[in-house]
């Protein structure tokens, strides 16, 4: 049973599994999930999302360069 | 979580009622017994109205009536205000309970046009709040925050698994489609957070992509094509999903018809055969009547012939004798005699005739005229008379043939009558009009199924093409992105977002699959634990398409063979498994839980529900008929509260009466 | 030649008997001539003839065809022993009437006397016996 600010264990496990060894991605998604959990209903999500993407994308791209 | 108290004011039959649910020692079971019309179902409606603002279990009669209690409305004066309020106090397991309160305010208007003596309640306002009390402070939540609390108590999407009536249970697996099971699992998987993340990431990704358009025409074209391809793919997937749903529904409906027809399928065939048999009987009866008349005719004919036969035979012999002796026909021509007399000269010898001779000729003439007439008559009847003997001799053969024909027809008629009786025996009790309707419906659903199958094939092809197009568009876009140096940062962000969306989708699928598997296992375990046929059913399964089935130890599908009680038990097991997997410890409230179960199964079901209450709060609302001695014997000892719903003396308001001392 | 009679007669109480016969399968739908001939034949078969007590018009002779007349002639010749009776229509019909009068009574008695097996069965049985007697005699 979820409560404010908490995610289900199962959800976090599912994300971990989907991200495999991509820790950057995993942290990024968990961060977003926490934001969503703290803001039920409509909220101004675009800025936090855009900001986090901007912070993470370049580094992630470097890590995943083939 | 459990309901501690329900307070109702002016809601439908409930003028002012407070129902407390103190937990019992061993079980958290609460029984409410009431006749139809005393407000049983409206108690469920009160709870759903409080939590969700709707009344899904409202009867047709109640839906035509405004919510405020009619007694209160009628007693009010023009301009008075009446408040309809339902309050639920819920123990969430924390220190203080949550209170869910919904209130509507009505102004009473008297003397409306056309209804001068009628008080009409006019809605003025609605308020829904959730009150959280902690450490002496009360926090009032409203709007989305309040709704979020409701979602944590009993999510609206799966409320049917917590607040339901036996009809719902009974129909659940009649109408359960893969879609509704998928929906329940979706809700329970609590992937709503993942859904939001995915949706938001997708939106941003699309915006990033659109930004790249202005960097080069080729990029713009590639991005537009990608967007278009994504849209087309989404539509194609949606069409396939819808079509699959239609196939499942059509198949289920077809199976329902087929199942009902099984055993009475022959009714149409029997009816057709009955018609044929009746028609044949009609023809045979007519043939028999004709044959009987023929036989009577033969009897008449032979009766006549038999009587005349001796006379006829004698006459025939006389005629032959006379002919043999040349007496007939006569030797002398009558004309010669006439001429002789006229001339008084013998025509033969030419001598004159004396008076004496003339008298002899005259006498001879007279004898010969009579004899000639008679002789002609005799000769003319000889032919027919000669046949009479032969015809009369055929009497026994004629009779035998007629009797045989009649016997054959009688045998045929007896066999046909037997067949008709057998058909009628089989048809007795069959509702042939229902059969015709079922056959018609079965044909309709069969056509729908085949039609949808055909369309599915086409849609799947379209989806495949859409997938290919999307792949190409993705490759083309990414290739263009790589080529366009100016979009460096955007490129990284787009790639990252796409990977993130992919990971979220994968997590969603994983969660759904895990939830599905857990519910499947839970349903199997609970069903096997509760069922009274321990060795008949082996396992419940929910496949990837979210179709539900149940198999026996030999692996044969048995969903269609479940009795009504077993079907309800399976639905209940599924429900309880959902509770377990979801982690929701919310109470179960069941209206008329055993109404659709009969005989011994009623007691079994009651036992199941009783055992359930040992682990969670169970509120059962029963009719007196359901609360039979068997059921009472099973439930009353473990119930924390047993109360009766009764209308007051004016029958406008429901009150509660304890059926147990001290409660 | 004798005078040409244009009808045969029956006794008054025979009317009811003919009606009774008409109710039976053998007589249903049959005309009076056919029933008259059956009555004559029944009288002949049982060798009983009775003078009519009263004379009521019954069947017009124009309805008798040549075959019907042949049978009546045979009966009259057999009764009188004189072939020339064929020329005396009146004498032929008299014979027929008296046999019919006796015959219809026998038939009516058979109808009344066969409540269980029915007239048709009883009549058929009698014909079988007559037929066997005739064949046996041959």
Image: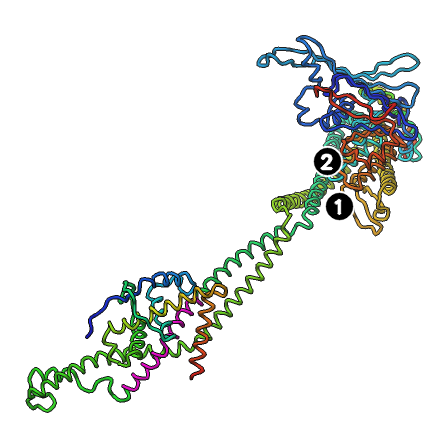
Q: Which residue is mark 2?
A: B238
Left or right of B27? Residue B14 is left
Left or right of B424? Residue C115 is left
> Image quadrant of residue B580?
top right
The answer to whether residue B633 is above or below residue B540 is above
The answer to whether residue B295 is above or below residue B562 is below
Q: Position of residue B647 (x, y in %)?
A: 73, 22
Q: Which residue is located at x 28 percent, y 81 percent?
A: C81
**Chain assignment, label 1:** B
In this rendered view, identify the residue nearer to me: B540 or B484: B540
Main SS of the magenta segment?
Answer: helix
Magenta-highlighted residues: B294-322
Q: Residue furthest top?
A: B79
How busy is the neighbourhood of tag 1: few (under 14 within 10 Å), some, or many (20 plus)?
A: some
In this rendered view, identify the residue nearer to me: C4 or B113: C4
Q: Which coloring applies here?
A: rainbow
Q: Is residue B475 magenta?
A: no
Which numbered disc covers residue C53?
none
**Chain assignment, label 2:** B
Q: Is residue B298 magenta?
A: yes
Q: Position of residue B142 (x, y in %)?
A: 81, 16
Earlier-in-chain disc, 2 versus 1: 2
> Image quadrant of residue B313?
bottom left
Q: Which residue is located at x 61 percent, y 53 percent?
A: B424
Q: Which residue is mark 1?
A: B560
Q: Give the secondary structure at mark 2.
A: helix
């Amino acid at each position: 049973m979820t409560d404010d600010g908490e995610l289900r264990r199962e959800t976090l496990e599912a994300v971990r599994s989907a991200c495999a060894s991509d820790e950057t991605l995993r942290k990024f998604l968990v961060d977003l999930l926490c934001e969503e959990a703290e803001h039920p209903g409509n909220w101004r999500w675009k800025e936090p999302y855009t900001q986090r993407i901007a912070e993470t994308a370049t580094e992630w791209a470097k890590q995943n360069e083939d | 979580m459990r309901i501690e108290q329900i307070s109702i004011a002016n809601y439908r039959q409930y003028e002012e009622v407070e129902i407390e649910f103190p937990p019992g020692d061993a079980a958290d079971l609460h029984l409410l017994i009431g006749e139809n019309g005393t407000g049983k179902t409206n108690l469920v409606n009160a709870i759903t109205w409080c939590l969700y603002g709707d009344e899904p279990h409202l009867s047709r009669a109640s839906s035509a009536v405004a919510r405020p209690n009619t007694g209160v409305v009628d007693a009010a004066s023009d301009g008075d205000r009446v408040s309809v309020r339902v309050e639920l106090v819920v123990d969430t397991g924390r220190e203080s309970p949550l209170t869910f309160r919904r209130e509507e305010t009505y102004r009473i208007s008297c003397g409306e046009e056309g209804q001068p003596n009628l008080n009409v309640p006019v809605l003025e306002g609605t308020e829904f709040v959730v009150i959280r009390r902690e450490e002496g402070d009360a926090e009032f939540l409203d709007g989305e925050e309040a709704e979020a609390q409701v979602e944590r108590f009993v999510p609206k999407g799966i409320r049917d698994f917590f607040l339901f009536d036996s009809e719902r249970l009974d129909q659940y697996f009649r109408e359960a489609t893969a879609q509704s099971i998928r929906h329940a699992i979706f809700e329970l998987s609590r992937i709503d957070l993942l859904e939001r993340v995915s949706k938001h990431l997708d939106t941003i990704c699309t915006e990033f992509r659109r930004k790249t358009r202005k960097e080069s025409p080729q990029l713009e074209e590639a991005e537009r094509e990608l967007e278009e391809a994504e849209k087309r793919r989404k539509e194609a997937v949606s069409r396939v999903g819808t079509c699959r749903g239609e196939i499942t529904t059509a198949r289920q409906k077809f199976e329902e018809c087929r199942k009902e027809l099984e055993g009475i399928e022959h009714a149409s065939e029997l009816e057709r055969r009955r018609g044929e048999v009746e028609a044949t009987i009609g023809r045979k009866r007519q043939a028999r009547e004709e044959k009987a008349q023929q036989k009577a005719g033969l009897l008449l004919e032979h009766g006549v012939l038999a009587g005349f036969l001796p006379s006829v035979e004698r006459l025939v012999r006389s005629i032959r004798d006379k002919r043999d002796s040349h007496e007939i026909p006569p030797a002398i021509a009558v004309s010669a005699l006439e001429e002789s007399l006229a001339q008084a000269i013998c025509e033969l010898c030419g001598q004159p005739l004396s008076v004496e001779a003339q008298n002899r000729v005259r006498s001879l003439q007279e004898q010969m005229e009579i004899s000639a007439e008679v002789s002609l008559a005799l000769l003319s009847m000889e032919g027919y008379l000669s046949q009479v003997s032969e015809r009369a001799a055929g009497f026994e053969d004629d009779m035998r043939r007629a009797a045989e024909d009649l016997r054959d027809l009688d045998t045929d008629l007896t066999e046909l009558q037997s067949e008709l009786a057998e058909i009628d025996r089989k048809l007795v009790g069959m509702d042939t009009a229902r059969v015709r309707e079922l056959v018609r419906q079965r044909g309709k659903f069969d056509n729908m199924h085949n039609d949808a199958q055909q369309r599915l094939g086409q849609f799947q092809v379209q989806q495949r093409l859409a997938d290919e197009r999307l792949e190409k568009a993705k490759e083309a876009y990414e290739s263009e992105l790589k080529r366009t140096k100016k979009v460096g940062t955007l490129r990284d962000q787009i790639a990252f977002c796409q990977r993130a969306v992919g990971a979220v989708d994968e997590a969603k699928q994983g969660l759904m699959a895990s939830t599905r598997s857990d519910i499947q296992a839970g349903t199997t375990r609970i069903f096997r634990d509760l069922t009274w046929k321990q060795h008949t059913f082996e396992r419940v399964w929910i496949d990837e398409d979210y179709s539900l089935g149940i198999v026996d130890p030999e692996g044969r599908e048995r969903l269609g063979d479940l009795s009504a009680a077993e079907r309800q038990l399976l639905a209940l097991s599924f429900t309880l498994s959902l509770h377990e997997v979801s982690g929701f410890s919310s109470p179960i409230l069941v209206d008329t839980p055993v109404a659709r179960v009969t005989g011994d199964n009623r007691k079994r079901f009651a036992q199941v529900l009783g055992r359930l209450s040992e682990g969670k709060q169970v509120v059962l609302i029963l009719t007196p008929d359901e609360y039979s001695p068997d059921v009472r014997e099973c439930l009353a000892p473990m119930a924390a509260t047993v109360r009766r719903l009764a209308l007051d003396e004016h029958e406008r308001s429901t009150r509660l009466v304890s059926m147990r001392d001290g409660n | 030649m004798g005078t040409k009679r244009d009808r045969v007669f029956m006794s008054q109480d025979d009317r009811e008997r003919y009606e009774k016969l008409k109710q039976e399968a053998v007589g249903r739908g049959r005309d009076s001539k056919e029933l008259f001939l059956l009555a004559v034949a029944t009288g002949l078969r049982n060798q009983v003839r009775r003078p009519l007590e009263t004379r009521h018009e019954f069947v017009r002779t124009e309805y008798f065809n040549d075959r019907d007349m042949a049978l009546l002639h045979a009966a009259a010749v057999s009764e009188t022993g004189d072939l020339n009776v064929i020329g005396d229509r009146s004498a032929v019909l008299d014979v027929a009437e008296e046999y019919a009068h006796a015959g219809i009574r026998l038939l009516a008695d058979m109808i009344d006397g066969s409540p269980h097996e029915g007239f048709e069965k009883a009549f058929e049985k009698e014909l079988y016996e007559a037929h066997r007697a005739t064949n046996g005699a041959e």
